[in-house]
Image: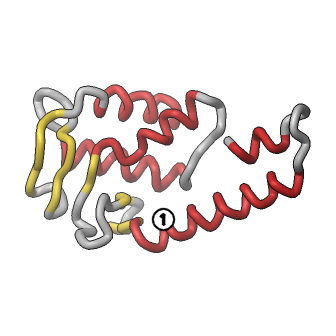
Amino acid sequence: AAEELARSPLIKDEAFAEECAAAFARGQQVLDANQWMDRGRGQGHYSFALEDNTSLMVDTFYPQVLSYTLGLGPLVDEAKLQAHLDTELEWNDSPYGLIVKSTASGKTPYGDVWQMGSPNWASMNIHLG
């Protein structure tokens, strides 16, 4: 958002926009290096906690919902985002909606259903097609 604002006709600060773009790219690289768990065959997820890479939290990508809503585009690689959403459904689904968190690669659900988990999951999947 800061990069877009800096590039706007009102602000026109290209140097700051470039700093924002570089910081965003660094953030994506760090997220992928530290929290992306590749399960092979196009499957994977972004772990919720560095100390437990088998964890998955349903609201991990709520900022992505906001970014799409504001027209700012993807925060991470969209193939990885789709893989993460697929894993959310596989590990955290319940008859009442998506469970807040799971550990042990989905074997241990934790917490209750998060009311916005399923609608946010659906809106991202609609956006991804």
Residue 73 in the figure: left or right of residue 96: right
Q: Nearer the viewer, residue 16 or 108?
A: 16
- Left or right side of 71 for 83: left
Side (left or right) of 102 relative to 67: left
Q: At which x and y percent is residue 101?
A: 20, 48
Task: Name which residue lies at 56% across and 28% down.
Answer: 69
Q: Which image quarter: residue 70?
A: top right
Q: Whole-percent x and y of residue 16?
A: 81, 54
Question: How is the model colour-coded?
Answer: secondary structure
Above/below status of 2 relative to 27: above
Vertical side of 30 occupied by 103: above or below: above
Please say if 127 is above or below 48.
Answer: above
Three-letter amino acid code of the residue under disc 1? Leu
Where residue 49 sits, quadrant-wise, is bottom left
The structure residue drawn at horizontal position 22% and vertical position 33%, both measured from the top left corner, is 114
Give the residue displayed 32% in from the left and 61% down from the top.
47
Query: Quick one: 100 or 42, which is closer to the camera?
Result: 100
Give percent across and percent down for residue 61: 42, 44
Q: Residue at x 87, y 57 (%)?
A: 15
User: x%, y% of residue 98?
Assistant: 21, 36
Which of the image's four quarters has the N terminus?
top right
Tally the numbered discs. Answer: 1
What is the quadrant of residue 2 in the picture?
A: top right
Element assignment for label 1: helix
Q: Which residue is mark 1?
A: 31
At label 1, counting other C-alpha atoms closer than 10 Å, the crowd grade (few under 14, some 14-19, many 20 or more) is some
